[in-house]
Every structure is written in C-alpha cells, then in structure tokens.
Image (cartoon, grey):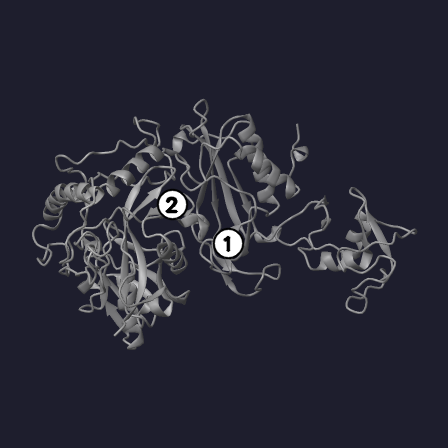
Amino acid sequence: QLMASVVVWEWLNEHGRWRPYSAAVCHHIENVLKGDARGSVVLGQVDAQLSPYIIDLQSMHQFRQDTGTMRPVQRNFYEPSSAPGKGVVWEWENDNGSWTLYDMEICVTIQNAYEKQHPWLDLTSLGFCYLIDFNSMSQTNRQTQRKRRLRRRMDLAYPLIMGSIPKSQSWPVGASSGQPCSCQQCILVNSTRAASNAILASQRRKLYGGTAGNSGATGTIAKAEQVQSPLSPANFPCSPVMPSLSSGHGHHALTINGQNNLNRPGTQRISMGTTRGTIPAGVPALPVKNLTGSGPVHPALAGMTGILMCAAGLPVCLTRAPKPILHPPPINKSDMKPVPGINGMRRKTKKKHLKRGKNPEDVVRRYAEKIKVIPDEDCTICMERLVMSSGYEGVLQHKGIKPELVGRLGKCGHMYHLLCLLAMYNNGNKDGSLQCPTCKTIYGEKTGTQPPGKMEYHVIPHSLPGHPDCKTIRIVYDIPAGIQTNEHPNSGKKFSARGFPRHCYLPDNEKGRRVLKLLIMAWDRRLIFTIGTSSTTGESDTVVWNEIHHKTEFGSNLTGHGYPDPNYLDNVLAELSAQGVGEDNLKD
C-alpha cells in the first residue's frame, strides 16, 4: 500500500538546529530533484532573498556563493495531516518586530495542541523552556518570564509524495543486501567512503556522547532507524541507493549513506559549541576568506572545493556563516561630536507640524496655466480626450473649475483637465504641492505622512568599510507607536513601530554631510517614513521606510544595507531628488 508523506527541506544553523525552508522553496527543490538527483538547486529562482544560496544535492549541502559558507541540508518527512501538510505556519515575533518560523518539529507540536483546543502547551519535553498560551497567543520564557507574541497563518502546503522516495542524494553504498556495483568508479568511491565513515563515526561519538539512543544533558536524541532499500544497486549500476519510508514514527528520516546522521529529530536541541572548535585528525579545514580580507582562499573557491570533497566522500571542516556587524564598538557619550557644518544634533516632528491644509483650487491654479488651444490628446489622469470633458464630471464638482477646462503645468509643460488635477490633489496628502503624474516633476514643497518622532545625528570615532580616511556620521531615528490620523491608511486605528530606534550610517566626508543635510530636510518634510505594510514581515499598519534607502549595517554588507558600497551616496541623492529634496535646496 502506497503511503503519502509531506516533504520538508531543512538546513542546519550555527546553533545546531534544523531550520525549515519555506513551502515554495521546498516545492522548487523537489522539482529539481525529480529531474536530477545529483544536480544543484539555485534558491534565488524562487526567493530573491536566497539569491546567494545553492543546494548541492550530491553532497546534501547548502553553499553560499559570496562567502563560501557551507551548511548541511536534509529532506525530512511528516504526516499529510500535520501542520506542513495543511500549510499552517506558526511564528514568533523577534526583537526587530519581524516574524520567525518555529522549527518544523515545534510547528507540528503546536498545531496538534491547537487542534485539540488545549489552552496552553509546555515545550519543556522538546528541550525548550517556553510556555505557549493560545488564549493570548503568546510565548513565555519560563526562566526569564519574557513574553513574545506568536501567530498562526496559512501558507502554501509543503510538497506531498507517494510511496518510497524516488531518488536519494548519495553515492551507492552497502545499504542493501544486493551485490555492490563493480565498476571502477564505485570501487573508488566505496573505498573512500569506508575511510571517511570511520572519521564521521568518531565525530558523532564525540558529539552525542555515545550511541544515538542515549540521553544527554541538553536533550534526548531519538534513535535513528536504518532504512533498507527495496532495490539493489546491482540492478542499477552507478545509480543512487533508493531507500524507502519508515512508518515507525510520526515523521520520517531519509537515510543517507546507510546512516541517519542528518535526520535525527533531536539534534536541533544539541549545542554545537563544544565540538565546533575540535577538528578530528585527518579532517582538512578550508581557510575561507573573511570580511577583513584575510585568508588564502577566496570564499567561492573554498566552497566549491568543499562540495567536490563532500561528493568524493572526504570529510570537510565547514565554516561558520558570517554575521552582519550592525553596530560599532561601544562609544562614550563624550566621544559623540556634532557634525561639522550642521547646527544642532537632533530634530523633532511634533503633532502641530503635521497638518498643512491648502485650498485645493488655489494649489491647482498656482501651478497649472489655463490654455485656450487644446490639443487632441489624452488626459493621462482620466484617460479621456482633452477636447472632451473631464472623466470626473459628475463625480467631483467645484464652482471655480469647469470640467472642460484644460491646464498646462509650468515646469514640464504636460497638460491635464484642471478638474483631474484637482481630484488628484484631493486624493493625495493635500500639503500644497503637486506632482506631475507623467514625469514626476514636483511643484511646491512635497511633504509626507511620517508620524511624530525624533532624529538624532552625530559623529562617532570609527570608520566605515570603504571609508578608512574619515570618521562616521551616525543617524538615530526613533518613532513611537501611536494612532493613525486622517492622512494615514486607517484613521483612528493603532499603528506599530517595530525596530526603533533605528541606527543608520554615513561617511563623515563632504558628500556624506551633504546627504545628511538633505536627510534632515526630508525628515522635516516627513518623507523618511510612512505608515503602510512591511515588505519584509507582511505586517500592516506599521511604520515603514519611504523609498529613501539607508545603510543600517555598520561594519559589513551581508544584507546589502551596509558598506562598502561606492554608489550608495549617489543613489540616495537621486532618491532624495525624486522626493523633491535636491541639492539645489541647500543654502551655501
């Protein structure tokens, strides 16, 4: 009888925990696996945030192209009725206000308790000192009593497979009772594998402190089941071993090389700290180039070398993934100096600054000149011909502006129905400015809908990567949560402010100071932030960036929001100009 199972691909993080890929990524990996079990999977094809990563199915490792870091991956299996089979995702809120997916084993456990309508769930039995409260949808640390929000949401269901796993990602080994293949390639691989397995077994004994079934001080490891292949490699020379699914547990592990060294459900709770520094004799370490440029091997070359060595059965000491350096070393308050050429060190946006009502008709007449000879072309606001009445006739009525009147904007010369310009203004921020919908030329002083807060800026005695010859300007934005007003998407509703205060960095040189002056001007015009939906977390009614990019990494550029970036200052000047904050606004 064929048995259905849900496939979840996972990667091993630096804390020794298996972290699941998203359902969309798992579907992508499975599709590639069907075509070539020894190929590679480019994760950026389905998730832009994973563009540096490639999975090598031959060695079952994830490879980061820009740093050369490699991590083990595994293909895990769950019941179709479990959380991944239903597309149910459980997440907790981290310190940055974004949502983090629980380990899949915990997701399954939480969903089971939720479906049984339990009021709470204690995760101590899984090795975590957390208490889940379904009534308040919160997670409480039993040691520190810190409480975090959690949420349940629906997503794409993980891929479903039937029967035995069609292909494995390993070289042929003696996992079956058939005669091994006698070709020269398999003889070479098997002899190499025998030597490497002895080293791997030694590593596992040191890591787990004995057999897989023993209990350790930090958690219990479920005993791995040897899964025998129903097919013999003798019938399929030079082909991968094809193991079947075991039905003895709630979820199933894929046997690689006749061993379950990557699929023990308890391994994610074991601390790797004590073993990471100890490299068994005979295991080569790849000296991967780090952020400071030291190291004899380029990251990409080191990573590819590691993949080839793994494919050949040679053990490799993998590097730890680099972490972004978000902040400078600790700084005394006395070391924070004013920015040369800029008065003061802070700006505030108060509620009395927020409203600048202007008469709509006066604004339109100020920037658009009425014309008598009307060309036979479209009004790009209402899409009616200019020689016809405005499409807003009957929808919007104004005593001083008739629907057939046409005006030309002064700077760019684009023409529209005056009633259409009036409707566009009324649908905007009503701040006394107009922006041409065709060429984006701004008339007047554009202001935004940024909620009240404060902006601080000062010089700190540290240099940014790529700017060793100058100090650093640090900008600190702080906006508290509050209530939306009539200029925001949902007037009267609360808005959140995640991740504040936010620290940003500029080089303390002439160009960096010019950018700071314009950022201060943009802050005063309430253009730096707005209230909307976060593109990273999906949370609505929250404070988000407003199309003016900032550098929030101090000492690295792993996320793309750091240094070195030789084009950043020019790019941000262009973004400020597009908001009507150009260098021509600066006083000499």
Task: State how far apart marks 2 and 1 are (Cα).
Answer: 30 Å
Secondary structure of the residue carrying tag 1 is strand
| Mark 2 surroundings: few (<14), some (14-19) or many (≥20) residues within 10 A | many
Residue 544, image x, y percentages: 51, 52
Residue closer to the observer: 576 or 429: 576
Quadrant, the N terminus: bottom left
Image check: 39 left or right of 426? Answer: left
**Are the two marked residues, 2 and 1, in contact with CB atoms closer than 8 angstroms?**
no
Q: Which mark is residue 12?
A: none
Residue 235, image x, y percentages: 22, 57
Residue farthest bottom in this picture: 116
Camera-nearest label, 2 or 1:
2
The residue tagged 2 is: 53
Is 66 located above or below residue 1 in the figure? above
Report if residue 133 is visible in the image: no
Q: Quadrant of residue 342?
A: top right
Residue closer to the observer: 64 or 321: 64
Residue 535, image x, y percentages: 49, 54
Secondary structure of the residue carrying tag 2 is strand
The residue tagged 1 is: 543
Q: Amino acid at mark 2?
A: Tyr
Q: Amino acid at mark 1?
A: Val
